[in-house]
Image (cartoon, helix red, strand yellow):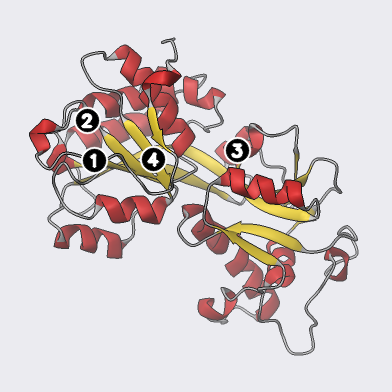
C-alpha cells in the first residue's frame, strides 16, 4: 500500500471552484477534476496515492460541485482553462453530450468505478424507520390525491412509522444523488400513491414547509440533523458508513443498505459511480492515462482495495477490465 500524503493534495473546498489554470495547455502540469460530492472522497484518496506513487506528475487537484456542476465545467471546451475529468454519481445525459460537442469536446471516455447506495438516515439516538418509496413520497410531496391530507408526523402516513415530525434534508438539483433519489424513490412512490400515469413533473413538486434542499456536500446535511434531531437526511452509503456513530439508517422495502446488499442488487436504491475523461487532453495534460490506470487498479478499486475500505462497493473484476479496455481503445460515449 502506498503511503498517504494528505498535505500533497489540494482539494478545492468551495463547491464547483478550481484553482486558476494557465491558458496554454502545455503549461499546466496537474490534472484538474471536479464534480460529484459522492465520488469526491474516493477521487481524493486516489489523487493522494497517485501523487506518492508517481512523483514525476504533480498531484491532481480535486473539487466538488455536484455531478451536474462538474459536467458543466467539463463540457465548457478544450484547453488548460477547462477541467480534465468530471466525477459523476449518475451517467452523463444526452443533453450534456450535446453541450460538450458544441464546445468541441467529442472524445468523452466513461469510467465506471464501482457502486454506491443511497440511504435515508436520522439521528443515531432516534427511532427506527422501515421505509418504502410510497411513504417517502407521501411525506414530502406537494401533490397528493384528492381527500388525502398532507401528513405532519410519519405515523400519520402509516401506523408502523414512528410518531415523529416529518423533516427531510435532501440533495439539491446540482447533485447526482438528487436524480437517483427521484428516479428510485420519489417517482415509484408517486406512481404507488397517485397512479402510474402521473406526470413526473407533478411527482417532482415537493413541499416547502418540511423539506430543505442541500446544495453543499453531505457534511451540510449532517449539520442539519445535528441541529434538529427529527430531520431525516439522504446520504450516499459510503458517507453513512463513515458516520455510523451519529447516524441510524432506515431500511427500504425491508432491506438494510450495506456493501453486500448494494453489490448484490438486493437493496433497491443503489447506483453506479463514474468519472468522465476528456480524451482531447490525453497526451497534452500529463498523467491522465496513468491516473485512470491507477484508479482502476486492484489496489484501488478491487475487492479489498483502498476504496472499498473507504466505502466504495467494488465492481466485478471482469467489469473493471472491460472499462479499462474501452478507455485504452478510445471508446467514447459521444460515438
| Disc nearer the start of the sequence (4/1) | 4
Q: CA distance from mark 2 to mark 4?
A: 17 Å
Q: Position of residue 136 (x, y in %)?
A: 71, 64
Q: Residue at x 60, y 48 (%)?
A: 220
Q: Is residue 29 left or right of residue 154?
A: left
Q: CA distance from mark 4 to mark 1?
A: 12 Å
The residue where tag 3 is placed is: 239
Badge 3 local density, few (<14 within 10 Å), some, or many (20+)?
many
Residue with the most extreme bottom position: 146
The residue where tag 2 is placed is: 288
Identify the image quadrant of the N terminus. top left
Q: Which mark is residue 84?
A: 1
Q: Please tell me which residue lies in front, 268 or 234.
A: 234
| Disc nearer the start of the sequence (2/4) | 4
Q: Position of residue 66 (x, y in %)?
A: 43, 51
Q: Residue at x 8, y 33 (%)?
A: 26
Tag 2–tag 1 contact (CB < 8 Å): yes
Q: Please tell me which residue lies in front, 204 or 77.
A: 77
Secondary structure beneath label 2: helix
| Disc nearer the start of the sequence (1/3) | 1
Q: CA distance from mark 2 to mark 3?
A: 27 Å
The residue where tag 4 is placed is: 63
Tag 2–tag 3 contact (CB < 8 Å): no
Amino acid at each position: 500500500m502506498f503511503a498517504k500524503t494528505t498535505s500533497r493534495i489540494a482539494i478545492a473546498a468551495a463547491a464547483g471552484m478550481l484553482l486558476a489554470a494557465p491558458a496554454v495547455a502545455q503549461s499546466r502540469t496537474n490534472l484538474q477534476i471536479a464534480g460529484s460530492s459522492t465520488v469526491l472522497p474516493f477521487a481524493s484518496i486516489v489523487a493522494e496515492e497517485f501523487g506518492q506513487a508517481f512523483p514525476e506528475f504533480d498531484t491532481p487537484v480535486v473539487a466538488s460541485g455536484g455531478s451536474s456542476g462538474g459536467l458543466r465545467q467539463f463540457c465548457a471546451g478544450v484547453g488548460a482553462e477547462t477541467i480534465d475529468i468530471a466525477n459523476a454519481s449518475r451517467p452523463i445525459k444526452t443533453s450534456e453530450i450535446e453541450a460538450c460537442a458544441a464546445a468541441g469536446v467529442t472524445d468523452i471516455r466513461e469510467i465506471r468505478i464501482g457502486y454506491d447506495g443511497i440511504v435515508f438516515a436520522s439521528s443515531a439516538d432516534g427511532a427506527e424507520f422501515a421505509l418504502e418509496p410510497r411513504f417517502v413520497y407521501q411525506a414530502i410531496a406537494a401533490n397528493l390525491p384528492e381527500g388525502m391530507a398532507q401528513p405532519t408526523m410519519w405515523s400519520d402516513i402509516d401506523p408502523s412509522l414512528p410518531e415523529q415530525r416529518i423533516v427531510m434534508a435532501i440533495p439539491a438539483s446540482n447533485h447526482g444523488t438528487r436524480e437517483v433519489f427521484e428516479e428510485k424513490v420519489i417517482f415509484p412512490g408517486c406512481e404507488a400513491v397517485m397512479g402510474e400515469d402521473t406526470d413526473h413533473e407533478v411527482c417532482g413538486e415537493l413541499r416547502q414547509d418540511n423539506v430543505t434542499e442541500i446544495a453543499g456536500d453531505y457534511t451540510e446535511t449532517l449539520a442539519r440533523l445535528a441541529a434538529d434531531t427529527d430531520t431525516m437526511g439522504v446520504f450516499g452509503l459510503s458517507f453513512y458508513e463513515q458516520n455510523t456513530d451519529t447516524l441510524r439508517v432506515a431500511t427500504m422495502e425491508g432491506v438494510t443498505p450495506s456493501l453486500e446488499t448494494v453489490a448484490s442488487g438486493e437493496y433497491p436504491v443503489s447506483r453506479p459511480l463514474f468519472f468522465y475523461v476528456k480524451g482531447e487532453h490525453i497526451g497534452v495534460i500529463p498523467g491522465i492515462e496513468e491516473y485512470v490506470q491507477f484508479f482502476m487498479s486492484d489496489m484501488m478499486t478491487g475487492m479489498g482495495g483502498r476504496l472499498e475500505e473507504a466505502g466504495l462497493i467494488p465492481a466485478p473484476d471482469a467489469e473493471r477490465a472491460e472499462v479499462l479496455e474501452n478507455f485504452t481503445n478510445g471508446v467514447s460515449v459521444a460515438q
